[in-house]
Amino acid sequence: MAASDVAEVADRLWRAETDRSPISPITDAHPDLGIEDAYAIQTRNIDRRVAAGRVIRGRKVGLTSRPMQQLLGVSEPDFGVLLDDMFVEDGDEIDLAALLQPRVEAEMAFVIGRDLAGPGVTTSNALAAIAGVLPSIEIVDSRIADWKIKLIDTVSDNASSGKLVVGGKLTPVTDFDLRLGGMALTRNGELIDTGAGAAALGNPARCVAWLANKLAGFGASLRQDDVVLPGALHRMVPVQPGDVFRAEFAYLGAVTARFSDGAEAR
């Protein structure tokens, strides 16, 4: 794909976010777009935000569940970049007007304790590099209308990143088996879903190893203090105005995502 086409698609996604107006799938207009092109589009818009003063604070891994991989016809996850303005303090109100079509996913959030660079990173290497785990709720969002995404669409769109809320309790990974850590998600006090760490590639730490190895191909690595989201423990849940979501994790504590009621969610 020509550099001018990468710039054109990146500009469309940029305008979709700033104008709060979702666009048609990128793959409709560019059916031959490859995964390297998609990451180039993602990087272009991340670079633009960093140039405007934003700071990279971590990464997110997506498509870590087998059903989602089968749905999009892929055999491995994807990744996006977490910037400082995406983070929301536990319980603070999230302005729906700043989002397009948000959905929530409860996840474990890892804080990296020392630099971790691929290739050749294993799950045990990842576990040794993780300082601890936080309870979190990711607010995924899509600049693609009606979430009609394929792999190329979501990668180009920074892995459908939006916001994330993290709790205040950091738990060492040695305190429990990540695979067996359970989670219960409520919306407005009503239980709506449950999950466990094994939903993310069988072990969330394996997602961190995959990410470190994948980043090596881009000349990048995970850095100390980075936050890494390893993937959802359940299906995405659409957000309505005024919703309050609470994710309670075994061993980790709880975290709350609270949404404003002053705008209609798409």
Image (tube, grey):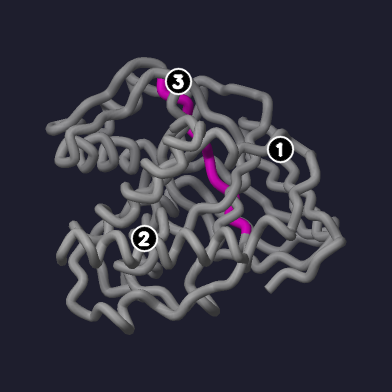
Q: CA distance from mark 1 to mark 3?
A: 21 Å
Residue under circle 1? Answer: 254
Q: Position of residue 210 (x, y in %)?
A: 26, 42
Circles 1 and 3, Cβ within 8 Å, touching? The answer is no
SS at circle 1: strand
Residue under circle 2? Answer: 10
Residue drawn at 48 percent across, 45 percent down: 197
Q: In the rendered view, does 190 fall on the left or right side of 148?
A: right
SS at circle 3: loop
Q: CA distance from mark 1 to mark 2?
A: 36 Å
Q: In the rendered view, does 36 fall on the left or right side of 257?
A: left
Residue drawn at 54 percent across, 73 percent down: 22
**Image vertical order of residue 215 relative to residue 162, above or below:** above
Residue drawn at 36 percent across, 68 percent down: 153
**Image vertical order of residue 101 relative to residue 212, above or below:** below
Q: Which residues are magenta?
A: 104-112
Q: Name which residue type carries label 1.
A: Ala
Q: Earlier in the sequence, mark 1 or mark 3?
A: 3
Specify the quadrant that holds the N terminus: bottom left
Q: Select label 1 or label 2 by which is in front.
A: 2
- Figure quadrant of residue 114: top left
Q: Position of residue 16 (x, y in %)?
A: 52, 66
Q: Position of residue 96 (x, y in %)?
A: 74, 58
